[in-house]
Structure formats: structure tokens, C-alpha cells
Image (tube, helix red, strand yellow):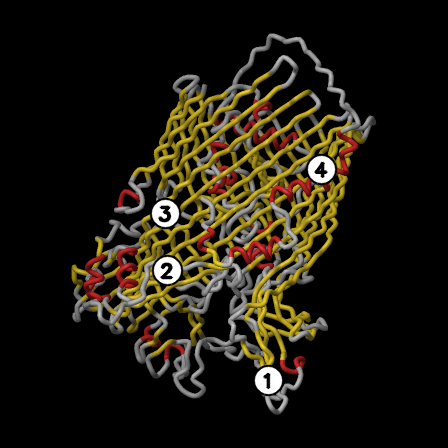
Amino acid sequence: MALNKKHINNVEAYKQVRNRFKLSPVAKLIKNSVITGVLGSFVFSANGQEAVENTQAKEDVEVISVTGTRRTIQDQIAIKRESTTVVDGLSSEDIGDLPALSIGEALESITGAASHRENGGATEITIRGLGPFLSATHINGREATNGSGDRSVNFSQFPSELVKKVAIYKTQDASMIEGGVAGVIALETITPLDFGKQSISGEVKLNYNPDEGNVDNSLQSDMGYRGTFSYVDQFEFDNGQAVGVSFGVQRQDISQPEAEYRSSSPSGSSLWACINDPNNTNEGFYRSKAGDCEDQVAGDELKNQGYQTKIDSQTGKAESDGTPYAWTGSSRSFRQNETSDERDAVFFALQYQPSAAWDINIDTQISDRTQQEARHDLIFLQKRATPGITGPTLVTNDVGGLLHWEGEERIESAGEQFSREENYQGYGINIEHTVTDRLTVDLDLAYSKTEREELQISNRGRTSSQKFFTWDMGTEIPHFTLTDFDVTDISNFTDSLRTRLDRENVRENEVMSARLDFDYLLEGNVFTSIKGGIRTSELSFVQFGGSQGNGSRNEFTLDSGTDALNVLQGCQIDFPESGFLSGVSDGNIVTNIDADGNAIGSGTGSSWATYDNVCFSQAVAGSNVDGQFAYPDVEYENTGTIDVTEKTTSVYLMANYDTEMFGKFIRGNFGLRIVDTEVTSIGFRNSFDIVTSDTGVLSLVESSSGSLDRIQSGGDYTKYLPSFNLVIDYSEDILLRAGIYRGMSRADPSNLGYSRTFEEDKEGTATSISDLLVGVNGSGNPNTQPLMSWNYDAAFEWYPNEDSIFALSLYYKQFQGGFQQQTVIEDFIVGGETVSLPITNSVTSDEDSEILGLEASFSYRWDNGIGMKFGYNFADTDFEFQDSLYGDTYETDVDGNSTQLQAGIIPPASVPGFSKHVFSSQLYYQIGGFDTAVIYKYRSEYFQPYTSNGTRLRYVDGVGVWEMRASYKINEHIRIKAEAINLFSAPKSQDFFVEGNLGEVNDYGPRLFLGMSFKF
């Protein structure tokens, strides 16, 4: 899929602004290659002599082939043992042999790695309990783009069957691309000549999800599939030249069943800490008049209040200090999903060796993914307090989470039709030249691009009045009781019919890079080689704006002349799922009772009245005179647009050593990488005119033309990243390892935007522009500095044999930087005059924090074919991340003075994505052609920021997941496979603001695959 440019207005303006001083992609690659290539051009021409081919006598050797799970674990052990850095990885002998359904699942089997789960599968990966924003991902040694606006990679975008190797580098050396404080995830596709053999392989997997069998899915059938085909071959010519080619393609068409309980999220303004004080009848749950609990009844009648954390200047404490409170959102709801997930991927590689001195590799990865969901919601509005009922009957836990609620509120039957299209393209060319028997030069050019677009229909039908209901917290989710109200009767939802059509999160992310490296072998007893290089890259991120900031919306309500019941009945469908949320509920999620408390059959159960979302939206839009069922356009020239360009130049020099000292062989490297980064951010704001009154007083008036002003800002920094790695061969089977490096993690591109609007003097006395403009509001900080850390590792590794390992690592990370609001002065040109104004924004602070961790790996195999592997990571940290609404917040003025603004009521979170405990285990049995394994993975609770508002706290509860796989090799060509993930249907549970305040539960059920593969 390519982004449909016809839905982006001002495309030419967008191109002109971005291309004003910008080369085309091809020209950029040429420019970057010239910059780096000139430095090495003299090297390429220094020696054209081809290396002399050596011939070796062949020996008759008996080869015992080890395959399957045992081979995978042996390769893991070998990767770790042979590396000079702390690294764990997986590799496959043949394409399609990587033992996992996805890259995310494969990475989870590596010690210290864990995933964030979406739709039941592994997506973003954490390293040693640290979130994905602290790690980097490289494909064939190059940066990868994504459509999320951050720097993580959605591994569901890439088929594991077409990847040769995955590895996690937990320490770094100077030659590695900067960006990973926690570590670097590396994916490698095959190089066909190095692969060394012809291969034609294919695989078909049928997918059946038991929970999908309970869904009448309009988007997907009960049975999905995944088909993969690959071809690898090599061609040698009489003149010594050789060409290798590889081609892989995959088609995936599956469902992703998911049933949900949901509460209002903390990312916006719909989840509050409402006052829960019987003595306060002016607001909260005990208010004297029915209304929203965060609003006041009398006096100032302030809205959106709730518990006030703002510091009282008289007491130095929060304004609501000591007042009891409880958490409540604007609604609680259940969501049933019909889902579809389609992905087409193509991987291609061409390797050409014109002589022994040259090696040219060209590779391509293309992935096109479309996800669709038809969502059906039953929504209970909730923050309205009913006098004499809600407050006296409220039951909470010790953190203010609700356990029992009673009151009168509206009920809605709602729905959404959602789709996301995401396209990834990666291209690269690598030229390696052996100039002499000592000097090798390597040139690499790369281009990566991701485009994403989301479309969504949102519908609503609701009750005409408030209905009385109660709910009680069950073992996993709440259960509701209604009095004489049937949620399965669609005629109960005929009020306020509305539809919204949104086009949002339309993003483009590109990375173009060029690098030139050299490797010079030394003659000596200590130092074996010197490596160095230069790399230039340019990252661009654009999020197109619209009427809703990050997108545009068309909204329609039902015309008064159209009968609502006819619309609902005309679009009504049977509830699409049986056994909805049965895996986490204690029985019926809704019980309908009469006035005497007796259960009524109709309206009791786990279903409600639903309708076809597209039909509903078309009917409501069509009832309006000018109503047109169409998604709106987004545009580049819009106040919601984010346009960031990040240019980086880095150079490094590194020495490798391998020698003997005190009777022990030692090896490793040390070096320095210098990174210079320049950020440019473009935004738009409404155009204003300065109007002077007859008395000489100035005022700021929005331009009548409706035009926008283009604004621009930026930032830069230079960082020095030294590194040192040491490996001591203490004995034939014991290694001692140590590593020290300085790492950096950059801010997400979406946070580097530049949006600014003026605050003007309201007293009407300004006679100059400097008096008129008193401040600036806005978001985004293009001068955000990276998070820096010093990292220390020490490890003991014992390798009794090729199937066994015991490794113990201690690591320590010292962070320089946190997140804080700070006031700075920015210059603006208004009416031809430069005005310096203060703005408060998020910055990287100078705070220090640390992480101390322990990592252990163990693997052993018995002679009877049974083997096991364990990995465990423990980490502890004093890093604090305060919630922006209910946490302690501070502001630093331009003079560096810090003032506390809020006294929080919730404890701070830790590093985003930080889990204290990560554990993985595998028990396998392999004998003959039969190979089976049982896998268990556990990750303790962690803080998962929202992409829409990363300053609000959301916790994902700890969970353990079981997986299983088995295969049987029928003959040397054919193998049958069975795989299952989330075997025992472990749900994902999330808490909002504070652990214990339940916010969301996602029940996915198990996912089963049965397939057959062939290889020739």
C-alpha cells in the first residue's frame, strides 16, 4: 500500500516546503555516497589486484547433522560464546527454520527480552526490562522506520520465516549505530552466496483460533492461513565471478480475536479522581444535585475539578490535601471485535562477487499490512453521581479503585469500524572491497520508509433518559445489574444517533543513510586490527494535520425528520459472538432484574443489541441534506502537522585486540564514536494581525484570510560515546566477560514537533508588541536532548559442551537525564519585530538515576533427547516518572529556579517499559524426526506510556504465557508442524494512573497453527 496522496490537501505546498532545499531520494543517496565515498576513493583505487585463491585438500569427515530445537540452542550458545560483546541471538540453518511464529516471539525466547502484547501476539520488545524507546532496531545493520511516531519497531510487520538471524546486543562497540541505551536488536536476512547452497522451500500454515470459532466474523473466516515461498541459488562463472540470488514472499490472512472490558483512559480528560467525602455535598460522589462528580454544584460552579493537586500558596500543600477520593471515568464498557489481519511481504537479495576482492550485496524488504476491526460496544456512562445513592453505596479499594457503584446514567450501544494500512520499504546496497591483504573497505547505502493511515467510523445510539444500574467488581472484570432494562432490545437506544468519520494518524517516516567503514589488519602480538568509519543519515517524520489535530473528522447526527428506530432496525445484526468474555467473567456480564430483584431472561447474559457500523453511518450521514458518507482529507498546511527532520553525522575509531596475558587468552575492543545531530522542525499557526485602536492600544486579531504562518525551530547536540569490551578465556570452557560503554537514546520524532500559539495581554493596555504578547502555549520541543547513560557489564560463562551453558551477568546503568517541565525563552518575529517570550515545555533534565540488574542463562540436554533452557533477568531502579495530572510536577524558570506546581496523590512510575522480573523457559524433546517444545514466558508489571499522551500513567499487569510447538520430519524434504501461542488464554490487564485501579482487560484466547513445509 502506498499512502493515497489524494486525501492530503496542499500536497504541492508540502512538497515545496520540504523540497525547497532538498534533493530527491535518489539524489540524496548519491550525495551521501559522495560525501562518504570521497573519503575512501583513494582506497578503492589503491590496489586492483585480486586476492589469490587458496585451495585446500578435502578430507573425508563424518558429518553428524544437528537440526531443530537442539540446533537452535546450539547456535544461541555459539553466538554468545564467539562474540566480543554481550550478545544473545537466534539463527537458522535454512530459511523458515527460525523457531517462532513472529520475530517478536523469537526475540522473547532470548534471555532478558520481553514483549508488549497486542492482539495476543508479541509486538514491541524490551531488553533487560527496559522499554523499547531505550533500544534500537537494525535490519541488516541499518535503521528501520515505523508508523508509530516513536523509534520502536512493530515486529509483527516482518515474517519470521524470511529472517535468517535475530540478535540482541546488550553491550555495544564503537562501530554500532548509536541509539540503544538498553541494547540493540539486530535482524539479518540471508546473503545468498554465503548461504552456499541451492534451496527451494515453501510452507503453508493453517490458523485456527478457538475464540474466533465463537465469532460470526464479517471480515474473516474461521480459518486463516499463512503461505511462504523462498528460493536461493548461486551461479559461478569460468572467469571467477559469482552471483547469488534469494527471493522470499509471504501472504498472511488471519484473524486476531479479542474481547475487551474498557474504562475511560487517562490520556485525555475523561478519568478523574473525584472527591469521596460525605461532608462535601458541593462536588464529588456526595454532591447534593445529580451531575458529573468532577463538577461543582454551587459557588464558583467550577467544571472539571475533582481532586486538586495544585499547590496552595498559603499552605504549601495540594488544594485538596487530605481529602478522600475515588477514581471514576466517564464510562465503563464492553467491546466485541470482528477482526482481520492481512500481510504481504517480499524479501529479495542479490550478491555479486566479480572477484575475490569485491563483494556486492543488494537487499530489499517490503511489507504491506492491513488490519481491520468491526467493534461493537455496550457503554455505561458513569461519572454522574446520583444524590443519596452513589456516595453512600460506593465501595473502593485502598488506592481508590471502584469495587461497587450505583446510580442513574445513560446506556449506549455504540460501534466502530477501524482499519489501519501500513507499508514498510527497506532498500540497501553494500559494497565490500579487499584493497590489500590487510585493508578492507565497506560502503553501505540505505533507504527505509514507512507509511501509515488509519480510518475509523464511530457510531452511537443511546437511551433517552438515565437508567438505574449497579455494578460489582468480579475476579477479573465488573458485572452489571440493571432494573427492567433489556440491553438486547435495540429500540432502547433510539436517542442521539450520531456518526463520525475520521482519517487520522497519517504518517510518513523515512531514513536515508550512507556509511563508509574500513578494517585494517595489524601485525602484532596484541592489537589485531583497527576499524573506523563515517556515517551520515537523515530521518524525516511527517504527521499530517486536520480538524482534530492529528487528523480530520466528518460528524453527522440523525436528521430530526428521520425515524431512529427504522435506522437501527434496518442495520441491526445478531450479536456476533457466543461466550463473550467467558475466559475472564464470573458468569453473565449483565443481569436484568425486575422491581422485586428477580432475574429476567431477556437482557440477562453476555450480549447486547448491535448493528452493522457501515450501514448505520451511511444512514445517519444520508439523513442530512448535505450529508455525504466520506472520510475527510488531511492536509500538510495545518496547525496539527508535525514535520521533523533529523540529520546525523557520526565517526568512529576502534581497535581490536587478541593476546595472551598471565597465561590467559584475552580479546576484545575499545573505541570512540562521536555523534553530531541537528533537528529541524516545521509547524504552522494561525496568522494574526496587529490592530491598533484609536487610543494606541494594540490587540491581536486572527487574520480574516484564514491563512497560516509557517514556523520553524530546531536543536542540536554532539555526544561522545566511548566503549570497551573484554573477553578472558579463563579455561577451555569458562569465559569471563566485561563491557563498558556510553549509550544514548533519542526522543521520539513525534515529540520533536513545533506547535506554538501566543498568549496576549488581556487588560487592554498594551501599546507595544512586547507588551501585547506575554507568553506562548504549545507542544513539542525540537531541542530535546537525548537520554544518556553509562553502562557496565560483567559476566561469568561456563560452556561444558555445545548443548550446555551457565551464564551469570551483572550490569549497572547510570542515567543522566529525566523528564521535567522547564520554562525557556524563545524568539519570535511578529510584525517585523523580534519578541522574546517564555514557554514551558518538556525537557530532558540533569537528574541522575541508576539501574542495577542480574541476568542468568542456563541450558542443558540429556542423552535421551530431553533438554531445557532457562533465562531470567532481575532489575531494580530509582528512576521516577511522574504523572502530569496526579503526580508531583515541577517547573524550572529561565534562571534555573525550580518550583513545585503539584503535590501528587499517586506514586511515580519507573522507566517506561521497565519490568523488575523477566523469565523465559523451554523444555524440549527431540529424537529422530520428532521435535517438540513447551515454552513459558513471564514479565512482571510495567509502565506503558500512551503514544497520544505519554505523560499519563498506564500499567500493564504482570502475566505468564505458555506456548507449544511440535514438528515431525517425514523425510528429508517434508516436515509437518504444529504451533500454539497463549495456550491457556492469559488475558492482558491494565491499570490506569495507579496499580489497582483497573482500566482495561483484553482477552485473546489461544492461537493455533498447523502446517507443512517442503525443502529441495
Q: Amino acid at mark 3?
A: Tyr
Between label 3 and label 4, give the one nearer the viewer.
Answer: 4
Mark 1: secondary structure: loop
Marks 4 and 2, Cα distance to the nearest angstrom? 48 Å
Residue drawn at the location 71% of the way across and 14% of the way down: 54
Residue 140 on image: x %, y %? 59, 36
Are discs 4 and 2 less than 8 Å apart at CB? no
Residue count near mark 4 (Cα–Cα under 10 Å), binned few <14, some 14–19, many ≥20: many
Residue holding disc 2: 501
Are discs 3 and 4 less than 8 Å apart at CB? no
Residue holding disc 4: 516
Residue count near mark 2 (Cα–Cα under 10 Å), binned few <14, some 14–19, many ≥20: many
Marks 3 and 1, Cα distance to the nearest angstrom? 52 Å
Q: Earlier in the sequence, mark 3 or mark 2?
A: 2
Are discs 3 and 2 less than 8 Å apart at CB? no
| Between 323 and 551, the one nearer to me in the picture | 551
Between label 1 and label 4, give the one nearer the viewer.
Answer: 4
Marks 3 and 4, Cα distance to the nearest angstrom? 47 Å
Q: What is the number of the mark on residue 702?
A: none
Q: What is the number of the mark on residue 314?
A: 1
Q: Amino acid at mark 2?
A: Leu
Q: Earlier in the sequence, mark 1 or mark 4?
A: 1
Residue holding disc 3: 1004
Residue 849 on image: x %, y %? 66, 57
